[in-house]
């Protein structure tokens, strides 16, 4: 009977280890999926904000034709269902270079620009 008890104890440890490893795997897979989804949302938010900048008459008037739009920082907020991003860009145009701040929010299955400002030589211009 001792061998059976030892075998049972060894089997229960193997089961516990298997369950723990499976839980770690599931949590890891879920985390990777979640991070990838957040990255995709972030990339989409930057794209929407970049298009907003490139099509802004205020940017065109003050910076000239846009040459480059480079995201420099992003801050996220909101909820999982309605994320928001505050994005900063260095924008270089034919006449000047400035810093543009754009706030975007995800609502009704699409990104929407909430606000945008151009900082140029100590002045702030509203892009909306």
Image (cartoon, rainbow, N blue to C red):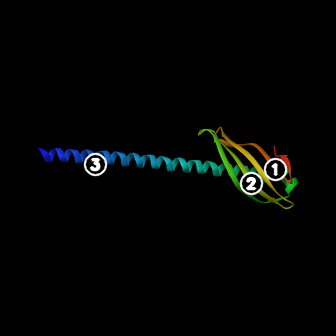
Q: Which element type, helix, strand or loop, lies under badge 2?
A: strand
Residue drawn at 71 percent across, 55 percent down: 71
Q: Which residue is mark 1?
A: 118
Which label sits in the foreground, 3 or 2? 3
Residue drawn at 70 percent across, 44 percent down: 104
Q: Which residue is mark 3?
A: 14
- Whether residue 79 sits left or right of residue 60 in the image: it is left
Residue 13, position as x, y percentages in the image: 27, 46
Residue 65, position as x, y percentages in the image: 83, 59
Q: Which element type, helix, strand or loop, lies under badge 1?
A: strand
Q: Earlier in the sequence, mark 1 or mark 2?
A: 2
Residue drawn at 74 percent across, 47 percent down: 102
Estimate the spatial distance between the alpha carbons at disc 1 and disc 3, rounded to whole Å. 61 Å
Estimate the spatial distance between the alpha carbons at disc 1 and disc 2, rounded to whole Å. 9 Å
Q: Earlier in the sequence, mark 3 or mark 2?
A: 3
Q: Which residue is mark 2?
A: 89
Q: Which quadrant would residue 107 be assigned to in this image?
A: top right
């Amino acid at each position: 009977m001792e061998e059976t008890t030892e075998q049972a104890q060894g089997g229960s440890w193997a089961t516990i280890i298997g369950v723990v490893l499976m839980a770690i795997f599931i949590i890891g897979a879920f985390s990777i999926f979640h991070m990838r989804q957040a990255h995709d949302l972030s990339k989409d938010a930057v794209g929407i904000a970049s298009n907003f900048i490139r099509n802004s008459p205020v940017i065109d008037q003050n910076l000239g034709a846009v040459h480059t739009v480079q995201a420099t920082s992003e801050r996220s907020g909101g909820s999982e269902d309605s994320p928001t991003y505050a994005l900063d860009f260095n924008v270089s145009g034919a006449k000047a270079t400035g810093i543009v701040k754009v706030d975007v929010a995800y609502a009704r299955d699409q990104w929407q620009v909430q606000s945008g400002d151009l900082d140029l030589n100590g002045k702030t211009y509203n892009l909306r």
